[in-house]
Image (cartoon, helix red, strand yellow):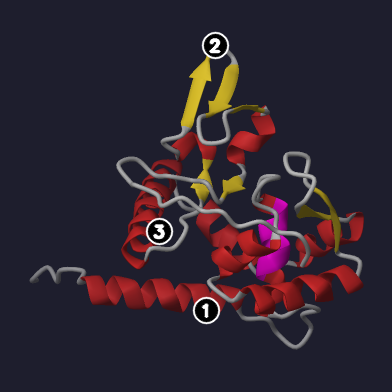
Amino acid sequence: MTHEPQTPDRIAELLVHVGRAARSEDARSELTAAQWTCLRFFARANGSTRTPSGFANFQATTRGTASQIIKTLERRGLIVRSRSERDRRSVCFDLTAQGSAMLAQDPLRDLIGVIDAVPTAERDGFLATLSRLTAALALRREVPAFGTCRDCSHFGTSGDTAYCACMTAELAAEETTKLCASYSGPNLTRRSEGNRDDAA
Protein backbone atom coordinates (compact mmCIF):
# COMPACT_ATOMS: atom_id res chain seq x y z
CA MET A 1 0.00 0.00 0.00
CA THR A 2 1.50 3.31 -1.12
CA HIS A 3 1.77 6.01 1.52
CA GLU A 4 -0.06 9.14 0.41
CA PRO A 5 1.73 12.34 1.46
CA GLN A 6 -0.38 14.80 3.41
CA THR A 7 -0.28 17.75 1.07
CA PRO A 8 -0.36 21.33 2.43
CA ASP A 9 -3.64 22.07 0.64
CA ARG A 10 -5.35 19.09 2.26
CA ILE A 11 -4.10 20.10 5.71
CA ALA A 12 -5.23 23.69 5.15
CA GLU A 13 -8.69 22.54 4.03
CA LEU A 14 -9.06 20.31 7.10
CA LEU A 15 -8.01 23.14 9.43
CA VAL A 16 -10.62 25.44 7.90
CA HIS A 17 -13.26 22.69 8.05
CA VAL A 18 -12.57 21.92 11.72
CA GLY A 19 -12.71 25.63 12.52
CA ARG A 20 -16.06 26.09 10.81
CA ALA A 21 -17.54 22.94 12.33
CA ALA A 22 -16.44 23.95 15.83
CA ARG A 23 -17.75 27.53 15.46
CA SER A 24 -21.17 26.57 14.12
CA GLU A 25 -24.04 27.22 16.49
CA ASP A 26 -27.30 25.32 16.49
CA ALA A 27 -30.79 26.76 16.83
CA ARG A 28 -30.52 26.66 20.64
CA SER A 29 -27.37 28.77 20.75
CA GLU A 30 -27.83 32.11 22.48
CA LEU A 31 -24.92 33.78 20.68
CA THR A 32 -23.61 34.02 17.13
CA ALA A 33 -20.24 32.52 16.21
CA ALA A 34 -18.62 35.99 16.31
CA GLN A 35 -20.13 36.73 19.74
CA TRP A 36 -18.84 33.42 21.09
CA THR A 37 -15.38 34.29 19.76
CA CYS A 38 -15.53 37.67 21.48
CA LEU A 39 -16.60 36.15 24.80
CA ARG A 40 -13.81 33.57 24.64
CA PHE A 41 -11.30 36.25 23.69
CA PHE A 42 -12.05 38.46 26.70
CA ALA A 43 -11.91 35.37 28.93
CA ARG A 44 -8.48 34.35 27.59
CA ALA A 45 -6.66 37.62 26.86
CA ASN A 46 -4.44 39.57 29.24
CA GLY A 47 -5.32 43.03 30.54
CA SER A 48 -3.47 44.99 27.86
CA THR A 49 -5.09 42.92 25.08
CA ARG A 50 -8.75 42.91 26.23
CA THR A 51 -9.50 45.99 24.11
CA PRO A 52 -11.66 46.69 21.05
CA SER A 53 -8.63 46.84 18.74
CA GLY A 54 -7.20 43.70 20.37
CA PHE A 55 -10.39 41.81 19.57
CA ALA A 56 -10.62 43.33 16.07
CA ASN A 57 -7.09 42.12 15.29
CA PHE A 58 -7.76 38.68 16.76
CA GLN A 59 -11.02 38.33 14.79
CA ALA A 60 -9.39 39.79 11.65
CA THR A 61 -12.23 42.25 11.28
CA THR A 62 -12.71 46.02 11.29
CA ARG A 63 -12.76 48.08 14.46
CA GLY A 64 -16.38 49.07 13.71
CA THR A 65 -17.58 45.49 13.37
CA ALA A 66 -15.71 44.48 16.52
CA SER A 67 -17.28 47.38 18.44
CA GLN A 68 -20.79 46.29 17.43
CA ILE A 69 -20.14 42.75 18.69
CA ILE A 70 -18.73 44.12 21.95
CA LYS A 71 -21.70 46.44 22.48
CA THR A 72 -24.12 43.54 22.00
CA LEU A 73 -22.36 41.52 24.69
CA GLU A 74 -22.33 44.58 26.96
CA ARG A 75 -26.08 45.09 26.54
CA ARG A 76 -26.65 41.45 27.43
CA GLY A 77 -24.62 41.88 30.61
CA LEU A 78 -21.97 39.35 29.58
CA ILE A 79 -19.00 41.74 29.66
CA VAL A 80 -18.24 45.00 31.44
CA ARG A 81 -15.81 47.77 30.54
CA SER A 82 -13.29 49.45 32.81
CA ARG A 83 -10.32 51.76 32.45
CA SER A 84 -7.01 50.05 31.73
CA GLU A 85 -4.68 49.86 34.72
CA ARG A 86 -1.67 50.54 32.44
CA ASP A 87 -3.24 53.41 30.46
CA ARG A 88 -6.20 55.24 32.01
CA ARG A 89 -7.09 56.66 28.58
CA SER A 90 -7.87 53.16 27.29
CA VAL A 91 -10.68 50.75 28.09
CA CYS A 92 -10.55 47.02 28.63
CA PHE A 93 -13.28 44.42 29.08
CA ASP A 94 -13.90 41.64 31.59
CA LEU A 95 -16.49 38.91 31.74
CA THR A 96 -19.28 39.31 34.25
CA ALA A 97 -20.47 36.37 36.34
CA GLN A 98 -23.21 35.92 33.74
CA GLY A 99 -20.61 35.91 30.95
CA SER A 100 -18.52 33.29 32.72
CA ALA A 101 -21.61 31.13 33.19
CA MET A 102 -22.42 31.50 29.49
CA LEU A 103 -19.05 29.96 28.57
CA ALA A 104 -20.25 26.69 30.12
CA GLN A 105 -22.60 26.46 27.10
CA ASP A 106 -19.85 27.23 24.57
CA PRO A 107 -20.28 25.11 21.41
CA LEU A 108 -16.46 24.90 21.23
CA ARG A 109 -16.59 22.53 24.20
CA ASP A 110 -17.31 19.62 21.83
CA LEU A 111 -13.99 20.20 20.06
CA ILE A 112 -12.22 20.76 23.40
CA GLY A 113 -13.49 17.37 24.54
CA VAL A 114 -12.22 15.68 21.38
CA ILE A 115 -8.79 17.31 21.77
CA ASP A 116 -8.67 16.36 25.44
CA ALA A 117 -8.92 12.70 24.42
CA VAL A 118 -5.72 12.98 22.34
CA PRO A 119 -2.56 11.69 24.11
CA THR A 120 -0.65 14.46 25.88
CA ALA A 121 2.56 14.19 23.82
CA GLU A 122 0.62 14.30 20.55
CA ARG A 123 -1.44 17.23 21.82
CA ASP A 124 1.67 19.19 22.87
CA GLY A 125 3.28 18.65 19.47
CA PHE A 126 0.10 19.69 17.68
CA LEU A 127 -0.09 22.88 19.76
CA ALA A 128 3.52 23.73 18.95
CA THR A 129 2.87 23.22 15.24
CA LEU A 130 -0.29 25.32 15.26
CA SER A 131 1.50 28.08 17.16
CA ARG A 132 4.25 28.18 14.52
CA LEU A 133 1.70 28.22 11.69
CA THR A 134 -0.26 31.03 13.32
CA ALA A 135 2.83 33.17 13.87
CA ALA A 136 4.19 32.53 10.36
CA LEU A 137 0.85 33.37 8.72
CA ALA A 138 0.56 36.58 10.74
CA LEU A 139 4.08 37.58 9.70
CA ARG A 140 3.37 36.85 6.03
CA ARG A 141 0.18 38.92 6.10
CA GLU A 142 1.74 41.63 8.27
CA VAL A 143 -0.94 41.40 10.95
CA PRO A 144 -0.54 40.93 14.73
CA ALA A 145 0.11 37.41 15.98
CA PHE A 146 -1.42 36.15 19.21
CA GLY A 147 0.14 33.77 21.69
CA THR A 148 0.91 33.32 25.37
CA CYS A 149 3.85 34.68 27.34
CA ARG A 150 5.77 31.44 27.80
CA ASP A 151 6.06 30.99 24.02
CA CYS A 152 7.01 34.62 23.41
CA SER A 153 10.46 36.02 22.70
CA HIS A 154 9.70 38.94 25.07
CA PHE A 155 9.26 36.54 28.00
CA GLY A 156 11.95 36.08 30.64
CA THR A 157 12.31 34.89 34.20
CA SER A 158 14.49 35.76 37.16
CA GLY A 159 14.11 33.30 39.99
CA ASP A 160 10.38 33.01 40.61
CA THR A 161 9.61 36.28 38.81
CA ALA A 162 8.28 36.41 35.23
CA TYR A 163 9.03 39.48 33.14
CA CYS A 164 7.83 40.97 29.84
CA ALA A 165 10.53 42.91 27.97
CA CYS A 166 7.95 44.46 25.64
CA MET A 167 5.88 45.91 28.50
CA THR A 168 8.97 46.33 30.72
CA ALA A 169 6.92 44.93 33.57
CA GLU A 170 6.77 41.94 35.88
CA LEU A 171 4.01 39.44 35.16
CA ALA A 172 1.65 37.79 37.60
CA ALA A 173 1.63 34.00 37.29
CA GLU A 174 -1.91 33.95 35.87
CA GLU A 175 -0.95 36.48 33.17
CA THR A 176 1.64 34.16 31.61
CA THR A 177 -1.05 31.83 30.24
CA LYS A 178 -3.19 34.62 28.73
CA LEU A 179 -3.36 35.67 25.08
CA CYS A 180 -1.31 38.75 24.29
CA ALA A 181 -1.37 41.09 21.28
CA SER A 182 2.29 41.99 21.89
CA TYR A 183 3.27 38.36 21.32
CA SER A 184 6.37 37.72 19.26
CA GLY A 185 7.26 34.16 18.43
CA PRO A 186 10.90 33.04 18.27
CA ASN A 187 12.78 34.58 15.33
CA LEU A 188 9.79 36.71 14.35
CA THR A 189 10.22 40.43 13.87
CA ARG A 190 7.12 42.29 14.91
CA ARG A 191 6.24 45.71 13.62
CA SER A 192 5.47 48.30 16.26
CA GLU A 193 1.84 49.05 16.95
CA GLY A 194 0.32 52.16 18.45
CA ASN A 195 -3.36 51.37 18.76
CA ARG A 196 -5.18 53.04 21.61
CA ASP A 197 -8.71 52.19 22.64
CA ASP A 198 -10.57 55.17 24.02
CA ALA A 199 -13.98 53.52 23.64
CA ALA A 200 -15.67 50.60 21.93
Give the residue type that dot 1 points to. Answer: Arg
Q: Which residue is mark 2?
A: 159
Indicate the quadrant containing the N terminus: top left, top right, bottom left or bottom right. bottom left
Tell me whether the residue at label 3 lies in contact with that at label 2, contact meaning CB atoms closer than 8 angstroms.
no
Q: Which residue is mark 3?
A: 134
Q: Residue at x 50, y 30 (%)?
A: 165
Earlier-in-chain disc, 1 versus 3 = 1
Residue extending farthest left:
2
Tell me whether the residue at label 1 lies in contact with that at label 3, contact meaning CB atoms closer than 8 angstroms.
no
Which of the 4 image quarters holds residue 174?
top right
User: Foreground mark, 2 or 1?
Assistant: 2
Magenta span main SS: helix
Give the residue type that dot 3 points to. Answer: Thr
Q: Which residue is mark 1?
A: 20
User: Foreground mark, 1 or 3?
Assistant: 3
Which of the 4 image quarters holds residue 137?
bottom left
- Mark 1: secondary structure: helix
